[in-house]
Structures are given as structure tokens and as C-alpha cells.
Image: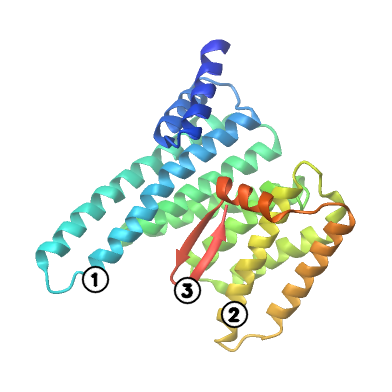
């Protein structure tokens, strides 16, 4: 593809995003991906935002209809209708996930040279296998979970070796990987350990926090904190250390104070704007928790 048509597609994706037509946005960025040697950071983020919204709408619909299906007692007809509709949404979700995974395996991961790009794409791979795992049948679920964990783990090892602990992509990976442990593997101890280590490592390297990424980094650290607070609260009910949540809050307070002293003040408005644009909230079985 020549440079001009590619620029036109990127511009079309931006227009589609503003119009909240995310299927159009995804189609444009898919075409860019298939005909580019490597995506720029802007193109990479447009691709991610497009498919996150496309798949997010189906995941939300799937949860709603699944809940209705489970509550349809005493009416076989209503239950059958809900099941049929849930299966339709489920197939759409699977098609989208497989579409993204195909782009990652065929175009994006093989061409990625920088550590940041490798981690970004491997994290995406882990995420979309995780979305598949949420709706997978018992026969398929084990292999899908294994694929998700392998992608997350490869990204995690690269990020630890080649990226600063405060880098937003490394922090976002830790956030999502910890959610994978908590929600998919049902391993709250591993989830808490991973999230807390990422949080502590970032606190220890606060001086490496760059001005251009501080909003994303501090937001993700707060999301890590929120998840940990929830998860340690769950564990307290199961006999875990009740002081852990207090220590975490104290650490976060110290972190925010340090940010303020460095002139890194995250306003409530800026946090809300970034949150609305980039982050999602998931209603899990044990309460709401966050990922990016």
C-alpha cells in the first residue's frame, strides 16, 4: 500500500473513533496492519482501541444475556431464546478475537523489533486468548488458557529484562496478567503477588517516571492498588493478613505525595478523561476489578 492510502485509512480510523463507529475503525486499522511493515505507536494504539471497543461490546452483551439465560426459570421458550442469542453473540466474540490473534501472529509479532512493541503485542495476544477463555467450552478452555498464559509470560519476561518498572506498558501487562490469575486461573494469591510486586517495583523506581507517560503510569498504579485492595479484602474474609490492605493504602499515599513533590499532579479531570478513553471495568464474580 502506498503512503497516501495508508494515511487516508489512519485518518478514517480516527474519524470512526470520534463517531464511535468502532467496527469501521477496526476494519481500517486491520487494512493498515496487513499492508504495513511495522505500525507506528499511534497506529498501534488506534488498532488496540478499535478492537478493544469492538470486542468489549460483545463481552458486555454476552454477560448480560448469559445472566438472563441463567435466570429464565419456568419458561423453556425464554431460556431457549436467551441461549440462542447468547450463542450468536459468543460466535461474534470468537470471530473478533480470532481476527485479532491472526493479525498478531501473522503480521505484528513477527515484525516487532523493539521491546516495547513485542510486549505490547504479546500482551494483546494474552488478552484476546483470555477473552476467548471467558466463553470457551470445557473441551477448548484448557488449551486457550495455556495459550493466554504463554503469551502473558513471554511478554512479562521481556518487560522485566528491557523496560523500566514505571513504563505504562509494563504496568498494564502486570495489571492484566494479575487479572488473568485471579479470574481465569482462580489463583488470588498469585494475582496479589504479581500485582503487588509490580506496584512495589514502580514505587522503588519512581525517579524513572517520564513526564510524557506519568498520567498513564500513575493511573495504572492506582488500578493495581484498587484491585489489590479488593483482592486482599476478599482474602481477609478467608483468614489472610488484615494489615496488608492498610500497608498498601499507606504506600499509595506516599507514592502520590512523592508525585506531588515532583510536580507530577494528576488532576481528577485528567484521570477521568484518560479512564473514559482507555480503560474498562469488569464485573467479576467477586466484585468489580480493573484491567487495561
10 Å crowding of disc 2: few (<14), some (14-19), many (20+): some
- Disc 1 to disc 3, C-alpha distance: 19 Å
Residue 186 placement (x, y as % from top left): 49, 70
In the rendered view, tell whether residue 178 sits above or below residue 235: above
In the rendered view, tell whether residue 20 sits above or below residue 287: above
Residue extending furthest toward the bottom: 239
10 Å crowding of disc 3: few (<14), some (14-19), many (20+): few
What residue does disc 2 label?
Answer: 233
The label nearer to you, 1 versus 3, is: 1
Nearer to me, 181 or 42: 42
Counting residues from the start of the chain, the first of labels 1 and 2 encountered is 1
What residue does disc 1 label?
Answer: 71
- Disc 1 to disc 2, C-alpha distance: 29 Å
10 Å crowding of disc 1: few (<14), some (14-19), many (20+): few
Find numbered disc 2 in the image and state the secondary structure of the residue it sits on. Answer: helix
Say whether marks 1 and 2 touch (CB < 8 Å).
no
Can residue 1 be spotted in the picture? no
**Residue visible at 60% across and 85% down?**
236
Nearer to me, 77 or 94: 77
Counting residues from the start of the chain, the first of labels 2 and 3 encountered is 2
**Residue visible at 60% across and 53% down?**
153
What residue does disc 3 label?
Answer: 286
Amino acid at each position: 500500500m502506498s503512503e497516501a492510502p495508508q494515511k487516508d485509512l489512519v485518518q478514517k480510523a480516527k474519524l470512526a473513533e470520534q463517531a464511535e463507529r468502532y467496527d469501521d475503525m477496526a476494519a481500517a486499522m486491520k487494512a493498515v496492519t496487513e499492508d504495513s511493515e511495522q505500525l507506528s505507536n499511534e497506529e498501534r494504539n488506534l488498532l488496540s482501541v478499535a478492537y478493544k471497543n469492538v470486542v468489549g461490546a460483545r463481552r458486555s452483551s454476552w454477560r448480560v444475556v448469559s445472566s438472563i439465560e441463567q435466570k429464565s426459570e419456568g419458561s423453556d421458550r425464554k431460556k431457549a431464546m436467551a441461549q440462542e442469542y447468547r450463542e450468536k453473540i459468543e460466535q461474534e466474540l470468537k470471530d473478533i478475537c480470532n481476527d485479532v490473534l491472526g493479525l498478531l501472529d501473522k503480521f505484528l509479532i513477527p515484525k516487532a523489533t523493539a521491546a516495547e512493541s513485542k510486549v505490547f503485542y504479546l500482551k494483546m495476544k494474552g488478552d484476546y486468548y483470555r477473552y476467548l477463555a471467558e466463553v470457551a467450552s470445557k473441551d477448548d478452555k484448557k488449551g486457550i488458557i495455556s495459550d493466554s498464559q504463554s503469551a502473558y509470560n513471554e511478554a512479562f519476561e521481556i518487560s522485566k529484562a528491557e523496560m523500566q518498572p514505571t513504563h505504562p506498558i509494563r504496568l498494564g501487562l502486570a495489571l492484566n496478567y494479575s487479572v488473568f490469575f485471579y479470574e481465569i486461573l482462580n489463583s488470588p494469591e498469585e494475582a496479589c503477588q504479581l500485582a503487588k510486586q509490580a506496584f512495589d517495583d514502580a514505587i522503588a523506581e519512581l525517579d524513572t517516571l517520564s513526564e510524557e507517560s506519568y498520567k498513564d503510569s500513575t493511573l495504572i498504579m492506582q488500578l493495581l492498588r484498587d484491585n489489590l485492595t479488593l483482592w486482599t479484602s476478599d482474602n481477609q474474609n478467608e483468614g489472610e493478613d488484615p494489615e496488608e490492605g492498610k500497608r498498601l493504602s499507606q504506600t499509595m499515599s506516599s507514592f502520590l505525595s512523592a508525585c506531588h513533590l515532583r510536580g507530577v499532579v494528576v488532576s481528577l479531570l485528567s484521570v477521568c478523561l484518560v479512564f473514559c478513553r482507555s480503560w474498562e471495568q469488569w464485573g467479576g464474580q467477586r466484585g468489580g476489578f480493573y484491567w487495561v
